[in-house]
Image: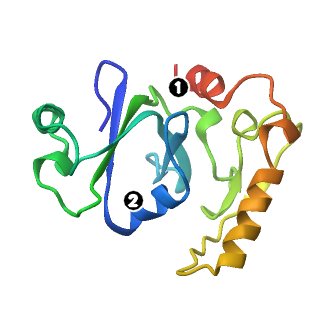
Amino acid sequence: MFLHDGRAILGQCGAAQTHLERQGVGAGDVFVFFGLFREEGGKPHHRIFAYLEVEEVLPLVDAPPARVEELERLGVPHAIGLHAANDTAYLGNGCTAARASDALRLTVPEGPPSLWQVPGWLRGGGKGNQYVRVHIEVPKKLSGEQKSLLEQFAKSCGDTDHPVEDSFWEKARKIFE
């Protein structure tokens, strides 16, 4: 949900929320929303259409009643009726794109929807094009060793290994304005 004052709210529950919690998603993280679009006479393509920079993670079951009522008044479905014991709201700055900018396009021009070119502003300090074919496979269970190896890999890919001129937030703000 994107509000007119620049705030955004994302509700999650069940397995999706469990995954976000296990990944440690919290304040400072950014959700990038994309979808499949087709302009009149054009081919289908993926494009980023919004973002949410998380400032607060609010587990709704334990939230103060006044906070839940505030979210109910805004029409947040997860606050209106709890869907699961882990219903959670992610709140922060965010907005939808003002226009269908080429800078937000993910699908390679004239390519199939599954062949993406990651925009330079999203990649960081690299030069040239980066082409990505998207195939998503989500493991159902990880062993302790697998989880440890993935955590080691993530740690080895820290920001110090991939410096950028602007933070993601600064780049995104420029693109969405």
Q: In this view, does 87 lie to the left or right of 17?
A: left
Snapshot quadrant of residue 103: top right
Front residue (pair 142, 37) = 142
Residue 113: percent from the left, percent from the top? 60, 61
Front residue (pair 122, 56) = 56
Determine which residue is flagged by label 2.
17
User: Which is more N-terminal, label 2 or label 1?
Assistant: 2
Binning the other alpha carbons within 10 Å of mark 2 as few (below 14), some (14 to 19) or many (20 upward) gives some
Is residue 135 placed above or below 52 in the rendered structure?
below
Is residue 125 placed above or below 86 in the rendered structure?
above
Q: In which quarter of the image is the N terminus?
A: top left
User: Of discs 1 and 2, which sits in the foreground?
Assistant: 2
Snapshot quadrant of residue 57: top left
Snapshot quadrant of residue 122: top right
| Mark 2 residue element | helix
User: What's the residue at 63%, 48% (across, down)?
Assistant: 106
Amino acid bearing label 1: Phe
Label 1–label 2 contact, CB within 8 A? no
Amino acid bearing label 2: Gln
Determine which residue is flagged by label 1.
176
Residue 82: percent from the left, percent from the top? 16, 56
Residue 164: percent from the left, percent from the top? 80, 29
